[in-house]
Structures are given as C-alpha cells and as structure tokens.
Image: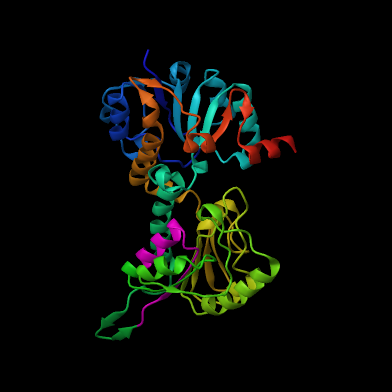
Amino acid sequence: MPVRMAVPKETISGECRVALDPTMAERFAKLGAELLVEKGAGGSAFFADEAYKNCRLMDDAKALYAEADVVFKVQAPTLEEVELMKDGTTLLAVLLPHRNLDLVKRLRDKKITSFAMELIPRISRAQSMDVLSSQAAVSGYKVALLAANLASGFFPMLTTAAGTIRPSKAVIIGAGVAGLQAIATCRRLGAMVEAYDVRPAARQEIESLGGKMIDTGVNAASEGGYARELTAEEKQKQADVLAKHIAAANAVISTAAVPGREAPKIITTAMVEGMKKGAVIVDLAAESGGNCELTKPGETYEHNGVIIAGPLNIPSSFPVPASEMYAKNLFNFLSPMIKDGNLNLDWDDEVIAKSALTRDGKIVHEPTSKLVQS
C-alpha cells in the first residue's frame, strides 16, 4: 500500500499558508504516494480545492488524520490534533520545541516520528530544504515594504518642481537571509542603506547588494552560519557604535535572532530616544521577544516620536510564495526517501538524523530532551 500523505488546514489564528501547494502535491503523487487534503486547506493561500489534482479531498481533520501515515503542516499541531493522529505517524512542521514542551512529550508518547523543519542542518546539500531561509526571504522583503510604509518620508531621492528631496537612510541589523533581502529591497526603493552583522564575513554580501557595512569591531561568528551570543563587553562595544548610526537613520530594520533562544536586545531605550522624530523601527525578531527593548510583539505604536513595529508571522502575509517555497522545501527533504510509493527514512543521512525531534517513543533532539528533563 502506498504511503498516505496528509495536508490539514492550519489551525493557528491568522495563519494563511498551507504546507503543500498543488504543484508539489502532484509531484509527490508522481512518486507513488497517495495524497489526502482537507477541504479548504489551501483556501487562505488562494489554492482552490479543485487545483489539488490526483489528491483525495477529506471532509474534516478527524477523517484525514485517521488515514494519514505522514502529516505535513506549517505550524506545530495542537495537542488536540496530535490526539487525532495514529500512533507511529510521521510529522513534518516547524515545531519550535523549546516553546512547546508539552507537545514534544505527547509526540514522544504517541511514538510520532517528528521532524522540526527549523532544525535542518545548514550544510550545502540541505540548502534546498532550508525552511528558515525560504521563509526569511519572504519576511525580509515584506519588512522593508512595511518600513517604507510607516516611515514619515520618501525612501528614494526625488527631484521635483518644488526642489530635491534627499533619500532616507535605512539601517539593517542582521545580515542573514532576511536582512540581506531587506537590504536589497530598501536599495530597490531608493534608500541609502547601512547594515550591521556580528559576522565580519557578511561584509561582502552586504556590499554586493549596495549596502555599507557598519564595523563595530565585534566578531561573533560561530559554526553552522549562526552568530554566537556576545559577552557583556562586546555588547557594550557594539551598542556604542550602533547608537550613532541608529540616531541618524530614518528607518531601522532589525532581524537578529538566535535559533532556540530569546532574541538579543540590541536597540536600547536610550537609542530609541536618541532617534529622529518620525523615524521607524521594524523589529522582525518580535517573534522571539524582539531586538528592541521597547518592542511589543504584534503591536505598532509610537514612543517619543519614533514608530516601533513588532510584526508577527510575516511570511503568512505573503501566503502564495511562502507556501510554494515551504512546500518545495518539504519535497526536497522527503522525496529522496520515497521509493515505489513507500517511505523509507535513511537514519544514516545527516539531514534526516539532525532534523528529527522524536522517534520510537524517544526525544532524539538532545537540547530538547534536556529541557524536558529539567
């Protein structure tokens, strides 16, 4: 019997993405898998039920989970959804285990083989499977547009009959995928762009996109392409230099995040109060607490004449490309393990082993296992 892959509706309020778009669903079907799609699952991403050809439409989640061998989701399932799954089901989603320990325990107890897609190792071979990167590209584009929309002036230089208007200065903090996309988008909009990243190697990428690197003299490069946590002395050195650049900015976009941890506080209250009236801060790290001390996740408000925005779940606001990219990540991750319609996971594969969260009634991701035991 071919493996049955299921695509339920997302249950988190405001989530508009779907885990599989019709194109990737069809590609899985060509590998011999049977596809089950809950009616309306793609509706918020503008994919009609009729577009899911070669898929069996299910009336509700209960019926879908009862037959599913593999479940594709964007957001982590609720405990209620896990109860609907068969013991031994395979689950792929962004699970954020450090925030969802009760969920992890239940996945373990039901012997669910779960893969946290955000744990995909950042190696060359896995780039096409990297969910964090694909969704960050969406976020970086959108926050630049949001900053331009909230700003009190034009981003580009304009020459008009009434005179020439100088371009805005944008400061981007963090030059990962989201930050680089924000740099590129702000430059396309005509702003002067400065960017900061604790990894000196980011300079070449920043400058290739037309930005200017802010050099604070702090190097926090670490393994896996991420930044390590700074010491107190390094944080102060960083803050002293950044404060001057932030004070001159019309827009600040912060994207600095450390997976599995609270976002580092980079923009202090004093920095905000030293900014120009009418300037804007868009804090993409609001999901994990924010890079700005004054960020209120999910809110946009004014402090001392500065607009501070802490948007949440940005990729969901562009559900079509975000869903398509996420679905392609899932396909690239799982398709090599499907032979003649059957799923055979290769546990010797580094990508499979390192992205697994629970397996055979155990929590196999060591950091999460330690959190559950503590």
- Extreme residue in the right direction: 374
Q: Quadrant of residue 328?
A: top left
- Give percent across and percent down for residue 97: 60, 39
Looking at the rendered image, the quarter that the N terminus falls into is top left
- Extreme residue in the top direction: 1
The residue that appears at 45% across and 41% down in the rendered structure is 15
The residue that appears at 46% across and 59% down in the rendered structure is 176
- Give percent across and percent down for residue 334: 40, 32
- Extreme residue in the front direction: 348
Q: Nearer the viewer, residue 135 or 368?
A: 368
- The vertical placement of 237 against 293, above or below, is below
The residue that appears at 39% across and 60% down in the rendered structure is 181
Looking at the rendered image, the quarter that the C terminus falls into is top right
Q: Quadrant of residue 339?
A: top left
- Give percent across and percent down for residue 218: 59, 71
- The vertical placement of 319 against 271, above or below, is above
Would residue 119 be seen by someone viewing this image from the given angle?
A: yes
Q: Is residue 189 located in the magenta-colored stretch of the structure? A: no
Write the start and end of the magenta stretch as one range: 166-186
- The vertical placement of 238 against 61, above or below, is below
Is residue 331 shown left or right of residue 89?
left
Q: Is residue 169 located in the magenta-colored stretch of the structure? A: yes
Q: How is the image coloured?
A: rainbow
Q: Quadrant of residue 360?
A: top right
Q: Nearer the viewer, residue 303 or 128?
A: 128
- The vertical placement of 31 against 175, above or below, is above
What is the tally of numbered marks visible in this picture? Answer: 0
Would residue 75 be seen by someone viewing this image from the given angle?
A: no
The residue that appears at 36% across and 65% down in the rendered structure is 184
- Extreme residue in the left direction: 161
- Give percent across and percent down for residue 192: 39, 76
Is residue 281 shown left or right of residue 6?
right
